[in-house]
Amino acid sequence: MAHRRTQYDQYDQYNENEQTEENLQRHRPPHRKLKGCFFWLLLFFVVILLVGGHYAFKKYQTAHSTINTIHQESGIRKVRDTNSTLKKGRPFSILLMGTDTGALGRSYKGRTDTLVLAVLNPKKESMTLVSLPRDTKVAVHGHESQYPSKLNSAYSYDGSASAVQTVQKYLNVPIDYYATIDMGGLENLINAVGGIDVSPALSFSYGGYSFIKDKKTQMNGKKALSYVRMRYSDPRGDYGRQERQRQVLMAVAMKATQVKSLLNEKFLNTVSKQMKTDLSFNNMLLLAAKYRKATHHMNSTNLQGESEMINGESFEVPEESEKQRITDLLRKALDLSLASTGSTLSSSDEININ
């Protein structure tokens, strides 16, 4: 079955010893301040419009072409009028996913290594980001007979459509847009910006590379991919890997928003091959015009679960009160009334949008 632990984990166990379940339960990461790396990766080409002059006009055309290339509808009916939401400058949500399709030579569709649900609220000048553990126990929308499944497997069924529908039903929060970046293609993105500098969150060796905690390290694409792929030797398990992924994505975002990257046609071409989103070019312009202030204050957290073994597989299972905390946080950020958290096993697909 697509969601079961099969060929995916042969890559995760490369050159490392698997960590015991007891350790994974014992160590939990503190909540850390995230940055809007995905947001800027999506919007970096819009900044071209601000460069000015005749040269910028030429790059405007390139940006338009790039956005048309990465634009891809999810194929599902949105639960609210998202275009009206953006035009009026109201808070909106976007599910940000890092897929493992091209990672380490994979050719199959893959799963979502990283899931972050972000809310941008320009009136409050705030961005709220919630990391969702990839091993969260869910019933994938449209594939409930496969329950229990891991949240990261939703993408392997029907792509962004099943991932979006599963998350919004799980939390009872409307998801207005999605964006994916191929983590395998991350190697090419990093090389296209000339490499990145990262201070490792811990010391370890993986994939033929060694990393020393807090020692600033220059990484090319291949080295950075090894840094974010390691999982079982991290004392914080998947939560620790999420932090490393955010570190690298942040570093890429900062390099990507530099003018020399924005005017780099090779970089634009690389992005067009690695990213997909249902945000249109006009949506991007609205974001640039109305939502830049939403990055002034950032509030971040993660859905915290407890490890549980089910039929020989490890799942993350949050308490209902923890799910409700996340639902309340997101709905408040969206300026929606408070409502009960959701359930992927519910017979109803209705999402409260009031």
Image: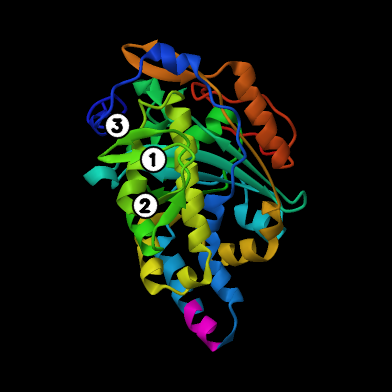
**Residue ID for mark 3:** 12
In the picture as drawn, the residue positioned furthest to the bottom comes out as 54
Q: Earlier in the sequence, mark 2 or mark 3?
A: 3
Name the residue located 34 percent from the left edge and 16 percent from the top edge: 313
* Badge 3: residue crowd in 10 Å (few <14, some 14–19, many ≥20): some
Magenta span: predominant SS is helix
Name the residue located 42 percent from the left edge and 68 percent from the top edge: 66
* Badge 2: residue crowd in 10 Å (few <14, some 14–19, many ≥20): many
- Up-down relation of residue 291 to residue 263 (above or below): above
Name the amino acid, label 1.
Val
Quarter of the image for residue 103 reads: top left
Query: What colouring style does the render use?
Result: rainbow
Name the residue located 38 percent from the left edge and 58 percent from the top edge: 189
Residue 73 visible in this rendered orientation of the protein: no
Q: Of circles 1 and 2, which is in front?
A: 1
Of the 4 image quadrants, the one containing the N terminus is top left
Task: Report how far apart the C-alphas of labels 1 and 3 lie in the structure.
Answer: 10 Å
Task: Report how far apart the C-alphas of labels 1 and 2 lie in the structure.
Answer: 10 Å
Q: Position of residue 339 (x, y in %)?
A: 70, 28
Name the element at disc 2. Answer: helix
Q: Which residues are magenta?
A: 54-59
Name the element at disc 3. Answer: helix
Of the 4 image quadrants, the one containing the C terminus is top right
Residue 32 visible in this rendered orientation of the protein: yes
In the picture as drawn, the residue positioned furthest to the right comes out as 123
In the image, is 297 to the left or to the right of 161? right
Name the residue located 44 percent from the left edge and 76 percent from the top edge: 62
